[in-house]
Each structure stands twice: as structure tokens, then as C-alpha cells.
Image (cartoon, grey):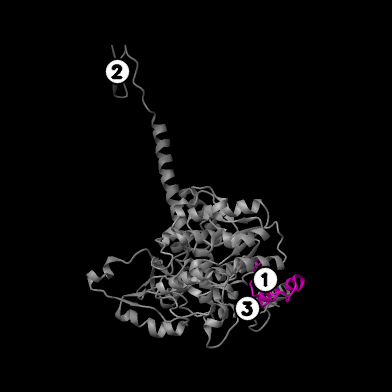
Amino acid sequence: MEVRSEGIQVRSDKLPAPVIPRTRLRIWFVRVCSSIVLWTCLVQLVTIGDLWHSHLISGITNRIYHIAQLPLPLPVQDGFNQSRPPLLPERNYTSNGFLRVSCNGGLNQMRAAICDMVTVARLLNLTLVVPELDKTSFWADPSNFEDIFDVKHFIDSLRDEVRIIKRLPKRVSRKHGYTQWEMPPVSWSNEKYYVQQILPLFNKYKVLHFNRTDARLTNNGLPLDLQKLRCHVNFQALKFTPQIENLGSKLIRILQEKGPFVALHLRYEMDMLAFSGCTHGCTNEEAEDLKRMRYAYPWWREKEILSEDKRSQGLCPLTPEEAALVLQALGVDRETQIYIAAGEIYGSERRLAALRAAFPHIVKKEKLLGPGELLQFQNHTSQMAALDFMVSVASNTFVPTYDGNMAKLVEGHRRYSGFKKTILLDRRKLVELLDMHQNGTLPWNGFAIAVQQTHKGRMGQPTRRKIILDKPKEEDYFYANPHECLCEVIDCDDLLGTGNSSKPP
């Protein structure tokens, strides 16, 4: 027997096949369509959030963005913020050409140069190619930009100021008939130089290559927006890679768990002694070795240097023995941790003996970390210097024994972090006091009082940069004291006072 029902034929001796009711199909179809519409709206909200800067829309779209990207929460450690801020809209401008830059020097000299070159690119409406780092100097570090700095963060965080690309497009290569003009810009130059002399070159050459970049922008006299851009690059855009940041944060955590610590930038290293010609405390054989090394590098000073004359003028780094006496005179407790923020000390442990006797808790990154943790950074001096940079910025007190690039940039970061204590040693006065104490004409109590009195106003307090007209090299360095960038929240007039005195109020 057969039964016909709604056009479907079945045999009566079998169960009917299951049929999906039309109402369930409709519900399923409505849900799919609703989901598509909902996600389309959410994607549109993300776009609208970038164009509008409404707090409500931004809050919603940021959540959507973070959910989509699934970022891992990263810690904020001592001024090094590892979170990624929401992207700002790209600045819309017609590029006048492409700027290539090859930075020279060590990590911190290159860091300041990168800040300057971003500012030049912004001033001239250029497209900046990610900077190339020095691989041929004394340090011979093969690291590229992306090995030290987070390149994506660098590009993204500056997109509202300047267009940055990872490499030159093929369409402007020599193969397509374009010639690159190579030159070093004039040091300590202002915006007038770049606008009047450099910008016209882009009318002839689509690509300009600055092959030396140290100190190519003046300290003072630039518009406030350019000065603040330099700070934005330095303090926000130039973030170390996650590998460096994570290991640096671990070093800081290990030190902080044991109490307060002093970061001593002991610049008594072979390259500094050879370059400067400072050999106080060295044997005759060591002095000759350093002299030969200086002559081996043609871009260093190929001339006779009178070491003791330079030392008396305060132009030499303190020796480890001198540093020990100065720290004791300043009242640093014997049990305080002293972190040596430096490479290999010339003379090694023999020269550290007096410092270790005065402060037994001398530590270095090589002693605080496991044997395999620094393996990836070996033979990469800039990456090792980045770790010391992080620890120095985070320390309770920072004491540089020479005012080189690292000392100056760490000083600036510590000012930016709330004027953290940085003891800026007056080496010229200290050499005089040290010699008097060591030849027996100044007893210990008098020596200690004199050292403390000398440095009362040299602790990293708020101060304006010293301006010396027509002598930019003798002015206070912008990156050591970017006072234009330190007063976003507080009123700096009370802190800095009026005028340009280099002494704090």
C-alpha cells in the first residue's frame, strides 16, 4: 500500500525520511544574515574610529582591534611601555623624495641620529627609509635596525608625522634611471640649512643618502613642534625588540628584588681610552698598546695626546680606583649594589679590585643571568648596550664617569621619567680633589665634604639648557636635557625659572 502526502511518495511499510521544517531553515538563514551584517558594521566602526576621534567610538573600535589581533598583555617596566597604542591616522602629504640614512657610531649616537633624521624628514616632507646602522666602526656590530628596535612600532607610531618605509621601491632604483646623491649633512645645522640647501637637491635627485648622521641637527633654535617630535621619536617610537625588552626587564627585576642599586657607567674601556688618549693608571706597555690602537683607526685622532693635560681639564673618564673614592665620598653605602653598565673594563678584574673592595656587591649582567641567556647577544655590542641602557634608566641612582653619548641619553631619559637622581660628575674639579687627597694634602673628611658640595647642584634637577651663541658644540646637549618636552603636565616655569642658566633653581 502506498500513501501520497504533499507530493512525497513513501511506502507504508517504511518510516518516512526526516524532513527539516521550513521554520527552522528560516531561523538559520536569518542568523547567518544577521551575523554577516553585524560583523560588517563592526568593521565599518573600526574605520570610522580611525577617521573620527570620538572617545566612544575609539573605545569600541580599540576593543574590536585587540580582540581581532589577540595581543598578549605585556608589562610596563620602568618607563619602557611594551603595549601597542592604537594607530593614529596617517599624515597626508606629497612626498618630495626618499631619504636614506646610514648612522655611524655606537648605539646611543645612532639613536640620537635617528631622532634627528626623522625630524629632518618631517620638516622637508620626505619619505624616510628605515635607517641603516653602523657595522664598520670599532665595535663591528652586524645588527640591523630590526635586530635592536621594534621596526613595526617605529613605523606605526610615527605615521601621523612622517612616512617611513622598510626599503626603497624598485621604481626609484638605478635600474630605472634614478641616481642617488650621497653626502654628509653639515653638523649642528638648523632648519634654514635643510630648507634652503638640502630640499632643492630633491628636485634633481629623487633619493638622497646621508652617509653620516651624528649631531646633524642643532640643539637650540628649532621650532617647538620639531623639538617635541625629536622627543616623541626618542621616548616613544624607538622601542627595543621584545627579546631585549624582556631580558632587560628581567635584569631590572633581579636587581630590584635585592634592594636599591646604583648604575655606574664606568667608561674605562679600551675603545674610549684609545680614542681619548687617556692613560692615567695604565702601565707603560698598556699606554703604548692604546696608542697603537688609536693610530690603527684613521678616523680617530692621529696625533700625540698628553694624557695628564687632558685629565687635568676633566676630559678623561675616571679610573675604577677614582670612581670608588668618589662614590664613598658621596655617601654611597658599602652594601649598595653597584651595577657596572659597561663592556669589558680595561685591565679587567685587576683594575676593579679597589672598587670591589669598597663595594663588595659589584654586579654585571653576565653574572646576574644564566649562561645561555646572553648567548643570542654575544658579538652584538649594540644589543648588549641596550640592556645596560634599560638598567641604567631604571636604577635608583645613575653615575656616569664620562659624558659620552650613553651618559647623555640616559640622563635625558631619567629627566623624562621624573627627574630621577643622576649624579653628573664635575671631573675637572674631582681630578684636583683626588690628587690633593692622594698626595696627602687633603684629609678624607675634607675630601668628602668638598665632593658633596661640588655636586649639590648636579643631581639631574630641572634646568634649562645652556645656550652659547655660535658655539653649539659647547652647549648643553639636547638629548641630555630636552626641557621643552618635560613640561606636558606640570608648569615648568616654577621648576626651570627664567633665563638659560645651567644651574637648577
Local packing at callout 2 (Cα closer than 10 Å; few below 14, some 14-19, many 20+) is some
Residue annotated with mark 3: 428
Residue at the location (40% across, 80% down)? 185
Residue type pointed to by label 3: Arg
The answer to whether the residue labelled 3 contacts the one labelled 1, judged by CB atoms less than 8 Å apart, is: no
167 part of magenta stretch: no
Q: Quadrant of residue 479?
A: bottom right
Residue annotated with mark 2: 10
Residue type pointed to by label 2: Val
Callout in the foreground (2, 1)? 1
Residue 79 visible within the image? no
93 sits left or right of 75 in the view: left
Residue type pointed to by label 1: Met
Q: Which mark is residue 459?
A: 1
Assign a secondary structure to mark 2: strand
Mark with earlier residue (2, 1): 2
46 sits left or right of 368 in the view: left
